Image (spheres, helix red, strand yellow):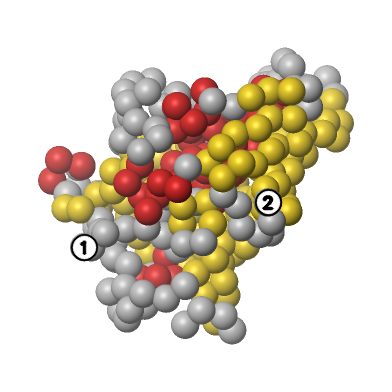
Amino acid sequence: MTPLSTLLASLEHHGEECHVHIPPDWQQGRTTYGGLTAALCVEAAHRTVPHLPPLRSAQFTFAGPAGGDVRMGTTILRRGKSTVFVSVDLTGSHGLATHATLSFAAERSSNLNYRHLPMPQVIPPESCNDFFSTHGPTFSQHFDYLNAGGASPMSSSKTPEYLIWLRHRDANASTGAAALVALADAPPPAAMAMFEASAPISTMTWSLDLFAAEEAGSAPWRLIRSTAELTGHGYSSQAMTMWTASGEPLLVARQNIAVFT
């Protein structure tokens, strides 16, 4: 296995490009795990664009397969007083694999302060069972998954919703945006809870808004809720939310997935 921290440390930076070799233990079917290619785009932006404020929003399009040697080319779309918009294209031997549009923004004073993203009441990690009843996809060996009370993949569930305690197995994974993005896509699509048996899936697009920096600590647990809201005609749209173990919201996301069943 190649831990996330080792993989990120191996990025080679040349001007507006970064290069890295993705090993097979990060594969998901015939391509690299999408959360990793998204994280590599975020890391490449940090390596190539100086003085970036915190990442606030990101949109990823997974256009094709990736694996082995890849390059990330970055372009500054606009730099303002408090915001920087960056485009990143991750390409490999098959051409464009992941396109990212990243929005970085500094804090600003505001009279508004409204919060309504309460964390669900769930059992603590030490009382939970494993999320996967059998082996998960290849890349899942880099994470710990616990079922916090939702459905499981391929359980013919009528309610396609996961509640998962999730963390990096890599104790040296950073607490930055790239590590958070790499973790947030780790659950399988919530539509798979309705599956009766394994079938192919493919994430097409993923957008997320980030609210807070990661909490400090050695691979802390996060709770993620993933819910398939609309599934039909071969596609599924899902909503995702992640909290720290203390209930602080970290991000919300939406994802569109192709399902082949």
Q: Residue at x 31, y 73 (%)?
A: 154
Image location of residue 211, percent across then percent down: 55, 34
Residue at image coords 20%, 42%? 125
Per the rendering, the mark at residue 151 is none
Q: Residue furthest left?
A: 127
Residue at 39 percent of width and 33 percent of height: 3
* Image side of residue 95 versus residue 127, left or right: right
Three-letter residue code for mark 1: Ser
**Disc 2 residue type (three-letter):** Ser
Q: Which residue is mark 1?
A: 133
How crowded pointer 1 is (Cα within 10 Å; few <14, some 14-19, many 20+) is rated as: few
Up-down relation of residue 89 to residue 200 (above or below): above
Marks 1 and 2: CB-CB under 8 Å?
no
Q: Nearer the viewer, residue 222 or 154?
A: 154
Quarter of the image with the N terminus in it: top left
Residue 93's disc number = 2
Q: Position of residue 70 (x, y in %)?
A: 64, 41
**Residue at 52%, 75% in the rendered image:** 259
Q: In the image, residue 246 lies at what x, y percent?
A: 32, 32
- Taking the image as drawn, is residue 229 in sight? no
89, 1: nearer the viewer: 1
Q: Disc 1 or disc 2, which is closer to the eye? A: 2
> Which element carries disc 2, helix, strand or loop?
loop
Q: Nearer the viewer, residue 61 or 29?
A: 29
How many residues crowd around disc 2 within 10 Å: few (fewer than 14), some, or many (20 or more)?
Answer: few
Q: Is residue 234 visible?
A: yes
Marks 1 and 2, the one that precedes in the sequence: 2
Label 1 vs label 2: CA separation?
Answer: 35 Å
| Residue 67 or residue 117, whichever sits in front | 67
Q: At numbered mark 1, what does the secondary structure look like: helix, strand or loop?
A: loop
Q: Is residue 131 left or right of residue 71?
A: left
